[in-house]
Image: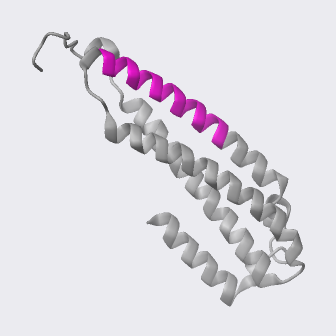
Amino acid sequence: MAVLGTLVVLLAVSACEPYSLSDNGNSFLRDFVNQNLLSLLGVIVTITLASAGNLHLELNKLQDRCKLNFRRTRRSIKLSSYSLILIFAVSCALVIIKPMLGKDMRATAACNSIAIVLIMFSLFVLIDITRTIFSIPASSTVPEIKANDDH
């Protein structure tokens, strides 16, 4: 909800007062929403996907030990992973399209706004995966359920 709200506010600012978010008025965004954006998101995606892979393996170990399937957690991890790949693809398209828009302040402000929201979303996914990782108990603290038990 925060990401959607931020997007609406930034796009409204882009439409009503574009100078503050455009390449003309914001040199940081002008210099950042290019290969630098892709570099940052590439690092976030790489770290998060590696963490998601490790999380998946740890869930496999816990599943073998306690015979729970962690269906909801696995679905969330899968959705987060694919959403990061989609965000990276959208960022690639944004970096390609933005220079084609020329000096139009509203268009560059909208592109910069979208880039801010993409980074924000990626960071929220990274936070979510990190919280999930730290909420997994140690295997030694989970009671082992034997295959012949009725649990």
Q: Quadrant of residue 59?
A: top left
What colour scheme governs how the chains and residues are painted in the rendered image of this protein? one colour
Vertical comparison of 1 with 22: above or below: above
Image side of residue 79 versus residue 36, left or right: left
**At 78% from the left edge and 46% from the top edge, which residue is drawn?**
39
Residue at far left of view = 150
Vertical comparison of 89 with 19: above or below: above
**At 46% from the left edge and 44% from the top edge, which residue is drawn?**
128
Q: Which sits in the foreground, 63 or 126?
A: 63
- Where are the magenta residues, as a range? 45-64
Does the magenta-highlighted stretch encompass residue 58?
A: yes
Vertical comparison of 18 with 70: above or below: below
**At 90% from the left edge and 78% from the top edge, which residue is drawn?**
102
Decide if residue 53 is in sight here.
Answer: yes
Name the chief secondary structure element in magenta: helix
Image side of residue 75 versus residue 22, left or right: left
Vertical comparison of 95 with 110: above or below: above
Quarter holding the N terminus is: bottom left
**Position in image of residue 55 (x %, y %):** 46, 28
Q: Which sits in the foreground, 31 or 72?
A: 72
Q: Which sits in the foreground, 49 or 137?
A: 49
Quarter holding the C terminus is: top left
Does the magenta-highlighted stretch encompass residue 2?
A: no
**At 61% from the left edge and 63% from the top edge, which residue is drawn?**
117
**Position in image of residue 60 (x %, y %):** 39, 22
Image side of residue 22 versus residue 121, left or right: right
Count of numbered tags: 0
**Position in image of residue 61 (x %, y %):** 38, 17
Decide if residue 21 is in sight here.
Answer: no
Q: Quadrant of residue 7?
A: bottom right
**Position in image of residue 96 (x %, y %):** 83, 63
Q: Which sits in the foreground, 31 or 136?
A: 136
